[in-house]
Amino acid sequence: MEMQQLHHFLAVARLGSIGRAAEELNLSQSGLSRSIRALEDVLGLPLFEREARGVRLTDYGESLVTRAEIICNEQGRAMVEARAIRALKRGDVAIGLHAVFAQFGGAEALDQFMTTHPTISLSIVTDAQPSIASRVANSELDLAFTLFDPVNREPGLVYEDLFELSCSIYHRIDGATDIGAIASLAELVDRPWALGGGVDFRHMFEAAFQTAGLAPPSRFVQSSSLRLLLDLVLRRDLFTIVPDQIAQTEPYIGRLQRVAVPAPGGRPHGGLIFRAEIMKMPAVRAIADQLRATGRLFGGLAPAR
């Protein structure tokens, strides 16, 4: 099996067409077809089925896609690292930041790192769970500084807990909504919500209402952009769940009021997610150390138990 064959296979799988893949790869259709057949011969399995408008992955082809993507991503990362060493650089690191840290604490940590390690290049992606962990698992990202469920975790990854995050329910201060009178989740079922995070957080949010014998709220907007959600909360009659440290900073301090009801979703853990072998790279170890220092000091929070 050759790397070139895997690249050809992924192009055809992505485009669903030998012709379009050949055009993208600047190959003849016959040459690309030979490459795919050679890979099928090596594996002893058919990878595609022909259809009227292109090709479709077989079950065997579907199972190969994820593995081939990981292999090709790792090859790309190895080539980038080798080029960096040849250029007398110290490395290139791809980082995932949860939306909370992209808005609060992330810029300060990266600024400090860039000051002390000016020859390391950084690629930064903002995302939410569980997508960010999946991108670490398939080698798109080297590591992530993120929030995560203390129980549900991606197999094969290292989760390094640094703290627990204190979150509360908030609403804008508008004089029209009597926030102080709200004393239970039952009073929040029919209210509109603005939710951050990803599917994991949505499930925890809904489970909190179901555990209390309530139907989850049906009116909500959800986004991985915390800034977008908070700007909406300041404009509209929306309830949200936000880290207390962010609610107490500009431009939100004095404009958000805390609801005296425990926030659904518990206390998410925060820290690093990475593949164990990636810490062999000096550049990754360096940024991980900076993020560890930021995590332990984040908002004056106590370390996770």
Image (cartoon, rainbow, N blue to C red):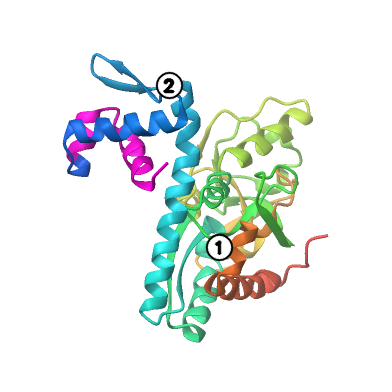
Residue drawn at x 66%, y 75% as measured from the top left: 293
Q: Main secondary structure of the magenta part?
A: helix
User: Is residue 226 shown left or right of residue 152?
Assistant: left
Q: Quadrant of residue 177?
A: top right
- Residue type at mark 2? Thr
Which stretch appears magenta?
Answer: 1-23
Question: Is the residue 274 above or below the residue 260 in the image?
Answer: below
> How far from the left and from the top, in percent, is residue 37?
33, 29
User: Is residue 200 shown left or right of residue 70?
Assistant: right
Q: Nearer the viewer, residue 165 or 220?
A: 165
> How far from the left and from the top, in percent, is residue 241?
62, 48
Q: Nearer the viewer, residue 282 or 48?
A: 48
Residue 154's tag is: none
Is residue 188 at all visible to an observer of this figure?
A: no
For disc 1, the neighbor class at 10 Å (few under 14, some 14 to 19, many from 20) is: many
At mark 1, the secondary structure is: helix
> How far from the left and from the top, in percent, is residue 290?
60, 75
At mark 2, the secondary structure is: loop
Q: Quadrant of the N terminus?
A: top left
**Disc 1 versus disc 2: distance between alpha carbons?**
41 Å
Q: Which residue is mark 2?
A: 58
Whether residues under marks 1 and 2 lie with C-beta atoms below 8 angstroms apart, the answer is no
Residue drawn at x 69%, y 56% as measured from the top left: 159
Residue drawn at x 39%, y 29% as measured from the top left: 40
User: Is residue 300 shown left or right of residue 176?
Assistant: right
Residue 101's tag is: 1
Q: Is residue 12 magenta?
A: yes
Q: Residue furthest top?
A: 52
Question: Is the residue 296 above or below the residue 158 in the image?
Answer: below
Residue drawn at x 33%, y 34% as measured from the top left: 14
Is residue 132 at all visible to an observer of this figure?
A: yes
